[in-house]
Image (spheres, rainbow, N blue to C red):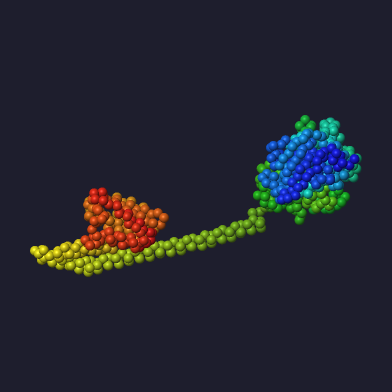
Amino acid sequence: MPILSILAAAALFASPAIHGGEAETFDCTGQVAVVCGDSPQRFMLLQDEGVRFSLNRSFWLEHPESYMLKSGDIVHITGEKRIPTGIIKDEQPLQSAFVVTNLVTIRHGRLPEPAKVDANEINGGRLTGKFVSVCGVASSAMRDDMNPQWNWLIIRTSCGDVYVALTDHEHPLETLIALTDAEVRVAGLMHKQHRWRRFSGPYLMAAGENAVETMSPPPGPERMRALRQSDFGAEAFVIKSLEGALLHRAKTEGVLVALGRGFCFVELQDGRLLKAIPRLGATVPARGTAVTAAGFVTLDFGGLQFADAEFWPNGNGRHAAATKAKPKKMEELFRHARNPDVSAASGIREIISVSGTIANSGENIRMSRTIRVESDGYSVNADLSTLSDEAIAELDRGCTVQVSGVCNAEFEAGPTTVAFPRFAGFSIFPVSDDAVTVVARPSWWATGRLLVLVLSLVGLLAVFLVLTIVLKTLADRRGQQLYDEKAAHVRTEAKVEERTRLAIELHDAISQTLTGVALQIDSADMADSLSNSPRSVFLATARQMLASCRRELRNCLWDLKSRTFDEKDMTEAVNRAIVPHIGSAKAMVRFNVPRSLLSEPTTHSVLSMVRELVVNAIRHGKAKTVWIAGECSNGRISFSVRDDGCGFDMASAPGPREGHFGLQGIRERVNAASGSVEIESAPGEGTKITITISEGES
């Protein structure tokens, strides 16, 4: 009966219903074949070919923690095909997914009996989507290189290898490694790998609780077939593989003479060299140990090799010496490689010694632990990965060295990948810690080092020139800065001299004239003192006005002579401005306004207003203490002058008519600066005047 008919009869209970609309929905019943991973959880159902879901359709559980799925479960599922979100999107970001929103487990059943096939049918690629089984010997087991939730197992058969993918939660890697060399039967769904993976092409995805069934356990070392000398012939190897004689591991005895990255070489008793690739997790003895080696017989371009090998030291732990290295010239080595009679099979895999010059630098040697030795236009690589740091510490470019070890031909691809792979050269693997001997060291005045010295001197000269240019630029910039500071100082001195000159002229002209006017008014007042004429009132006012004028002029003269406006700290500038006027009174100043924010006109205006307010507080308010405070916020300057004087009634305060111009002058200054004035005063309670102006306003 065809396999799909069996699946339809045994596992299909209802056809899926597909509904149109904005989202494609599904409603179906089937048997779980494979549960892929833990989170997000993906599974596959066995169904008939007549419905829209094929055997390799994947369903994703939106909430995997709500279900405990296992192979063989018969389930009813509903959901929709849509662009995934969350952890499902992380696994399948570029295409729609069949997302299960509801799942009901009907019962647990057994999967249908798979069809028995061989490796030729599987690798032919015509069984994709079929539920099949294959028998063979378990060899290599490894973790998937891109998805750690999956493992791979290679099954050896008489007609080829079969690659099997298994979920790690059902088939842990340690369990698969323990099956090495056991005869097994594997059942699962056939798939074809197109994405970038270690293996590409058809493979079997294990399905069911008993997906991997052990037919017979691995044979112990005593039951293994001994490797024969005739097995080293390529044609005999192919024939025996087809007959199934070498499906299981074979064993041999020898000395482990060299180690590489991921493989080693065993020298057999007849002098032949066998390449061995250790099994995952296997312990490889030290170089020079007499061992019994067992592995799956395969063939590479250098001859016979063991895959998935294991090693057991023998000879009571005694170490054996390797065959003495045979001296060879590189030209001879490559000539033999071109000779078909010599290069066939293992004709060029032997222990040799070559001499030449190291072509790579010491830094590269210590990083890659590989040297390239050149001689007569040829070169070979020496793998130093097993040597100690002390053994390679003195190796450097130009040293002439002699290297002893196993010579192995390297190719760009394996023998099963292409028919004619590209030859990549020879590599030598040391057979002892002193396998690399320095014969001669390069002269210090070698061309390469001389070139390095010259380039170093040129580099130092370039650095010197750059430093010279930078220092000259810095010196020019500092000179210009000093020149600007000197010029600013000269301008300041000139400004002070001009102020002094103006002060002298004002004193000699206007001040003396106003003094004369005051004397004349006093004389007129005295002459009219005997009469009751109201002229005395007007003359008193005129005298008050003249006194105010003289006081203002005196302040202007003091400002012109003083360096108060050159102060960098406004608190100090305020102190200087009021000191000549406070007498025995105390002044408390806290003016937290940076001088750099104020222009010259604004500074002059602020200091003049503060001084006028302090003079009024002491002269008219009889204040003993004056508090002056200032601050800057949001582009506005606020300052206040508060005293403990007698205060006044703002409604009856004297003004310009009575000869009092102080507050009037302050209001005019504040209005010009687009500011405001607030006055708080009452008889007997002192006075506080707060002024607010904009930064930079004159």
Residue at left offset 83%, top offset 32%: 217
* Residue 314 in the image, given as x and y percentages of width and height: 79, 32
Q: Is residue 256 visible?
A: no
Count of marks, rendered view: 0
Q: In terms of image quadrants, where is residue 119?
A: top right
Residue that extends furthest to the left in the rendered view of this protein: 530
Q: In terms of image quadrants, where is residue 204?
A: top right
User: Along the horizontal axis of the image, is 8 left or right of 485?
Assistant: right
User: Along the horizontal axis of the image, is 582 left or right of 238?
Assistant: left
Quarter of the figure that contains the N terminus: top right
Q: Is residue 480 above or below residue 268?
A: below
Residue at left offset 56%, top offset 58%: 460
* Residue 669 in the image, given as x and y percentages of width and height: 32, 61
Quarter of the figure that contains the C terminus: bottom left
Q: Is residue 485 visible?
A: yes
Residue at left offset 30%, top offset 56%: 610
Residue nearer the viewer, 637 or 257: 637
Residue nearer the viewer, 541 or 570: 541
* Residue 506 in the image, given as x and y percentages of width and height: 24, 67
Residue at left offset 82%, top offset 36%: 111
Residue nearer the viewer, 439 or 500: 500
